[in-house]
Amino acid sequence: MIDLNKKKYILTTSLPYVNSIPHIGFGFEILITDTIARFLRNLKKEVFFITGTDENSFKIEIKAKKAGIDTREFCDHFSNVFLELKEKLCLSVDIFYRTSNDVHVRAVNKIISNFDENALYVKKWESYYCQSCESFVGNNPESNSCPLHNTPYRFISEENYFLKIATHIDLLFGLLERNQIEIIPDIYKTESLDRLKYFDDFNVTRIKSGELGVPFFKDNKYVVYAFFEALISYINAVGYFSNEKLFYETWMSEDCFIIQNIGRDILKFHTIYFPLILLAAKIERLPDQIMVHGFVNKNGEKISKSKGNIVSIDELAHNYSSDDIRLYVLSHNIFDDFEFSYDDLEIIKQNSMKSCTLISSCVDKHNLFHASMDSDIDSSYYRGKFIGYISMYKFYEAISLFDKFLNVLNSLDFVDDTNIELLYFMTSTLRPEFYKNNHK
Ligand SMILES: [Zn+2]
């Protein structure tokens, strides 16, 4: 649940790799986050909605080489494609952070230089590795290939810099256990606590093998491990390195609530790595909430570029408004996986047209009478319910409440000021494109 008693909110999505076009899986994540951002702004909160692109992974370089395009150009192109989602999905993103930006390298190295003198050490490490996940899976993975990507693991053996974590494990365990970092839904809290019990020191570097990557200032044989440096984006986006004032007024402020929205495939990086990195760097202000949404499946499997079952946002945006796409994904319990269905999306589109007509007719009924008298409808009931549903991330309930309210309003002869304000509140939260185009 969102703590509505704060003044400021930082909302983050994961930062997708720039190695292919955006699909509905990421669309789901960013539309959830955008809806929360709009909802909070409607409640007069100050919101910092952060998304962006992760551009330092070696796999991007491989892709660019295959395509015969200069790596930098390749990153610029795809980063721009993600930036264009702002238009295509009607997003209210405040900060679009690219890990290729000028100060990222310095911010990452500043974090590392904040670690205690003896916190880093070199050791040889061997593990299976999924290049697409950029993740180590240990010496005895359950299968030979990554279940998310269907690609075989590579065995990697290299000397790397590791971060000692023993000093912070108990503290983090307590914070997770007491929900001071709240993980929703609960099963991922349990999973994180279970993992943490057996968690070992983790690598901060990888051997430099191409042109991409954040140079590691202590040893130029290395770059900083892709996940490690990508996580620093969240604090750097609000000024960790470049704007101390902003950083203290946002991330470090007690009046700020920090929500991170992720998929379960990157759970450990957000519930374990990131807090441990911050603690090791003596930033004792950790995210308040990590919400773990479900996957969008196609043919029973998670949509992913390596599986070739992509539903691209471009393709959807040709046939559907951003509101249709938004209402379609939000009509599910966002914490469960769901199977993408064009039929269901089509039903949403048809119903949506009817609802938009009803909204317009309510606005007419308000304008016509400019009613200063009160109607019989108690909007505070609907308002309270709506706020409750969204702050508990029950978007499907909020959507049906919206429809119900709309029908009730339409049965009236006139719509009074309080009711029209609530209608605007709901519309601009759940149908921002329609609101933008019609509300003058
Ligand atoms: Zn993988």
Image: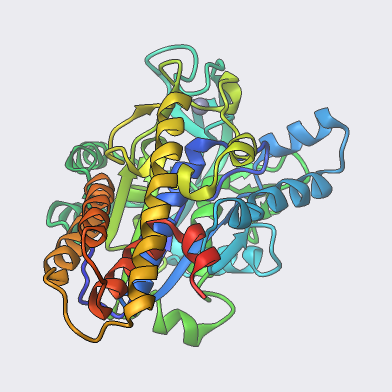
Farthest residue to the top: give it.
144
Picture layout, residue 201 above or below residue 380: above
The quadrant of the picture occupied by the N terminus is bottom left
The residue lying at 59 percent from left, 57 percent from top is: 86
The residue lying toward the viewer, choosing from 15 and 437, is 437
Query: What x and y, as percent, mark residue 36?
Result: 35, 60
Give the answer, above or below, for where 248 lies relative to 365: below
Q: Quadrant of residue 252?
A: bottom left
Q: Is residue 9 visible?
A: no
Q: Is residue 346 left or right of residue 389?
A: right
Q: Is residue 317 above or below residue 94?
A: above
Count of numbered marks: 0
Q: Residue at x 39, y 74 (%)?
A: 251
Q: Position of residue 324 (x, y in %)?
A: 47, 44
Percent from the top left, x then y, of residue 330?
Answer: 35, 44
Q: Nearer the viewer, residue 329 or 8?
A: 329
Residue 169 picture location, percent across and down: 25, 52
> Is residue 318 visible to us here?
yes
Q: Residue at x 30, y 40 (%)?
A: 199
Colouring method of the image: rainbow
Q: Would you say 220 lies left or right of 311 here?
A: right
Is residue 277 or residue 44 the one in the foreground? 44
- The residue at the point 70 percent across, 43 percent down is 208
- Is residue 91 or residue 94 the one in the foreground? 91
Q: Name the quadrant containing residue 421.
A: bottom left
